[in-house]
Amino acid sequence: MDLKLLSSLAVENDTKVVLVVMDGVGGLAGPEGKTSLEAAHTPNLDALAQSGVCGFHDPIAPGITPGSGPAHIGLFGYHPFQYLIGRGVLDTAGTPFVFEPGDMASRLNFATLAADGTISDRRAGRIPDEEGKRVTDLLAENIKEIEGVQVLLQHVKEYRAAAIFRAKQLDGRLCDSDPQKTGLKPLEVAPTQENPTSEAAKGARLANTFIARAKEVLAGEAKANFVMMRGFDIYDPLPNFCELFKWRACAVAAYPMYKGVAKLAGMRVIEEGQSTVEEELDLVKRELPNTDFLFLHIKKTDSMGEDGNFPGKVEAIEHFDRLLPRLVDLKPDVLCITGDHSTPCSLASHSWHPVPICIAAKTARVDGCQTFGETSFLTGGLGRIRSTDVIPLLLAHAERLMKYGA
Amino acid sequence: MDLKLLSSLAVENDTKVVLVVMDGVGGLAGPEGKTSLEAAHTPNLDALAQSGVCGFHDPIAPGITPGSGPAHIGLFGYHPFQYLIGRGVLDTAGTPFVFEPGDMASRLNFATLAADGTISDRRAGRIPDEEGKRVTDLLAENIKEIEGVQVLLQHVKEYRAAAIFRAKQLDGRLCDSDPQKTGLKPLEVAPTQENPTSEAAKGARLANTFIARAKEVLAGEAKANFVMMRGFDIYDPLPNFCELFKWRACAVAAYPMYKGVAKLAGMRVIEEGQSTVEEELDLVKRELPNTDFLFLHIKKTDSMGEDGNFPGKVEAIEHFDRLLPRLVDLKPDVLCITGDHSTPCSLASHSWHPVPICIAAKTARVDGCQTFGETSFLTGGLGRIRSTDVIPLLLAHAERLMKYGA
């Protein structure tokens, strides 16, 4: 669906729409032939399925496994191929850092360089937040510009930070310096083979100089004596989610990256404490009166899937199910529960499998689905849609889309 | 899915993928309200359906009936609109003929011309192979070039051959000379109305001169005293299937045209004897260790459908089912069984109906389908996909695709 056309149909009204993303919620059959969703005791999710329309969405296209960035971008209605966001921008967006269009951002991992010039620890012994912040500040004090280009540093978490080069007309299509394995030497940053532009050559030069100067600045550090750069990208603002769909949008998420992707879309992001689902739900209750669209992100389903922890994923789902009445009691006009992608415990990674989705609304054509799960949803009324269809459907169920044509 | 992007995600590993195409396998309800697949006793196909994910693919788009060429091209991942291959190239590709890019190929049917200048037999009495080969050689000896353009001849089967004009910059968008009915005069070859280019005009002139000279050369023949030309096309190589998807690919097929389309995609084609399914399976067993992707083509399901022979199609399906354990015993990581299109016996022709597909793999999200058939697959986990989604899904289930984006 063309965003401009969709936007031209959007109208304002008083409805409230809540989109809950249970990260990585879809799965594969576990020990007893059931997925985590099916093995979990979920009376509240089941009731929601009974009152709504259910089915699946493909995050990108059949067979394609998405990263978290493109998976969310798609759910927010932007085509993930057209709006690909690199890790450097995505990670930084989750911090208080304020981008300017054209900024080149790179993820910065503090690492330990051995005397022989090889990487002995790709995470600098997983230094804690305070330590990571201290060495980031140390770099910021000592490296303010390279070749006349302003260099900005932002701590992200533990051993992770971001470096931003504030120059117009850089090209961020660069290879990482991270060799991905310990015992190897760091790589030179260079333009990707397909895009050897002079702007990319300049970007690579800035990055390599930055790495060399960072090595000097960090020479006295025991663990974080080196940095590796990866996920180079140029910040190019997305069309604004609030303006496109003519609603106020707000994001509640515990993890920086999901706050980041919501911020990139132009949503208002709640920055304060929300480290548990209970805290997140308190914030949802507080913020819903001040917003029209609320994105709530639940992380633990994905973490447990990535760990291959089947009972853990079941418990994360049941935990959310127990809290779901707090959300239902807020009586949003449209309540959509889905995931950004599947994370089957048996694969312990993101996967391509279609993601269960349920849209509960007075305007939904209720199907016969009795339980919230992969097998049950096979006969759901939504069938198999694309993630980019979700926002148009939420707008429609909120009666926020005009008729197309006379 | 963009082929270049898909290719950029493909990685090598040790998995084996087998794609079985039961030509024309989908059908319509027969005498007892069941399709051929449903009427057939297929315990082995049913077991596969129970262990995999099932559904349908549309060969081209809803409502569109494909020829064998576009149907296979789509299954191999190439968009059939973007990569349309004409019959002239398709038929010739199934022979040992070696194309050069830019060759203009036309199917050549030997025919009988009556004294009044009308076609009395469009197949020259279905002359046998030896006879067809003799008259093809006769043409080759006598017509080596026209207007300085090299003319090459290749016998295909019985009364069918191919003529290839080796010139760069011809335009093959030409109308057939075959009037499609006996008792009519052959048509002049001419550029299609939509494409009256000067290159097409030259192509048409070469073709008409060829037909006139062939008539002189064949004047003494009792049956094959004339040729008709159809399916003009320019040979334009496809992106290589093995390079795109980073695997070794091999084709086992009994009929030349299916070997041809696999060869056009760049697969290694087994040329030797494989006239029965049993012989084909022997070759699969021999070749699987030397390949990563194996395409196995089963012809008889389509032939029986085209003949409107319902019991014959049931028997062709049951015959394959009895042999299926030989394939399962080879333990491919991904085993996909589908058709290239439907061929309902009641229509006695290819049709537009969605084609049943089952993907069996450890990584499949098993659905509740208990039997291999059109009604059962309606609640399958694949839903309704496009034929071009099949290769991405096979790669995904073989864990041969990297994550898209961070």
Image (cartoon, coloured by chain):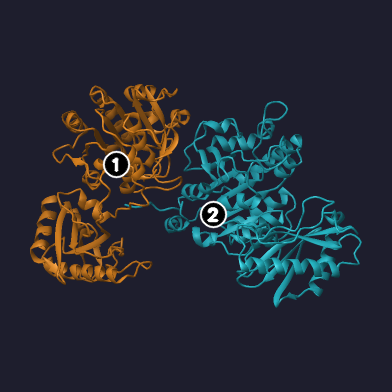
Chain colours: A orange, B cyan
In the rendered image, the residue lying farthest to the left is: A141
Q: Are the residues at dot 2 and dot 1 in contact (C-beta closer than 8 Å)?
A: no
**Quarter of the view holding residue A14:** top left
**Residue under circle 2?**
B78
Q: Is residue A177 visible?
A: yes
| Same subunit: marks 2 and 1 | no
Say which element carries label 1: helix
User: Residue at the location (69% across, 31% down)?
Assistant: B39
The image shows residue B94, relative to residue B336, as above or below, that is: below
Q: Position of residue B99 (x, y in %)?
A: 65, 68
The image shows residue A34, relative to residue A121, as above or below, that is: above
Q: Is residue A309 visible?
A: no
**A398 left or right of B400 in image:** left
Other-residue count near label 1 (Cα within 10 Å), few / some / many at <14 / 14–19 / ≥20? many
Query: Which label sits in the foreground, 2 or 1?
Result: 2
Query: Of the residues shown, which amino acid type is indicated by label 1?
Result: Ser
Q: Chain of mark 2?
A: B
- Which mark, by number, is residue B332? none
The image shows residue B381, relative to residue B87, as above or below, that is: above
Other-residue count near label 2 (Cα within 10 Å), few / some / many at <14 / 14–19 / ≥20? many
**Residue under circle 1?**
A303
User: Residue at the location (45% across, 32% down)?
Assistant: A33
Return the residue nearer the eye: A291 or A188: A291
**A68 left or right of A149 in image:** right
User: Residue at the location (66% across, 45% down)?
Assistant: B23
User: Residue at the location (18% across, 54% down)?
Assistant: A99
